[in-house]
Amino acid sequence: MNPVNILDAKTSLSRLVAAVESGEEKEIIIARNGKPVARLAPLEKRPKVRLGLYQGRYKAPKDFDALNADVARLFGIDS
């Protein structure tokens, strides 16, 4: 797509964003007086965080919960 003038970009911003969002346009260059000054491009999609990613890959030591009562006491909780 040829550069879009700022005034045209202001009046058709929703359409330009939709074009970038849908993939119709990879990016849109916005120009002032014919000189490129900005780029409208989609954000990179971040991978979703999966809970339990290490499930089954890590084995907790047998005494993992051994200090729970001591820690609870430090916080003023009687167990």
Image (cartoon, rainbow, N blue to C red):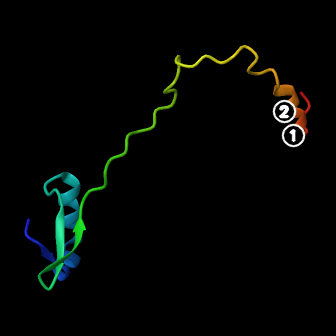
Residue 66 screen position, x and y as percent = 81, 20
Q: Which residue is mark 2?
A: 71
Which corner quadrant of the image does residue 78 belong to? top right
Residues 34 and 10: in front is 34
Q: Is residue 60 left or right of residue 12?
A: right
Task: Point out residue 75 in the picture as x, y percentages from the top left corner.
Answer: 87, 40
Q: Position of residue 3 (x, y in %)?
A: 11, 72
Seen from the viewer's position, the closer of residues 70 and 9 is: 70
In this rendering, is residue 42 above or below 13? above
For the C terminus, the image quarter is: top right
Q: Is residue 5 above or below residue 44?
A: below
Amino acid, disc 1: Phe
Could you say which is closer to the camera, residue 30 or residue 7?
Answer: 30
Residue found at x 52% / y 26% = 52
Per the image, the residue denoted by label 1 is 75
Identify the element where label 2 is drawn.
helix
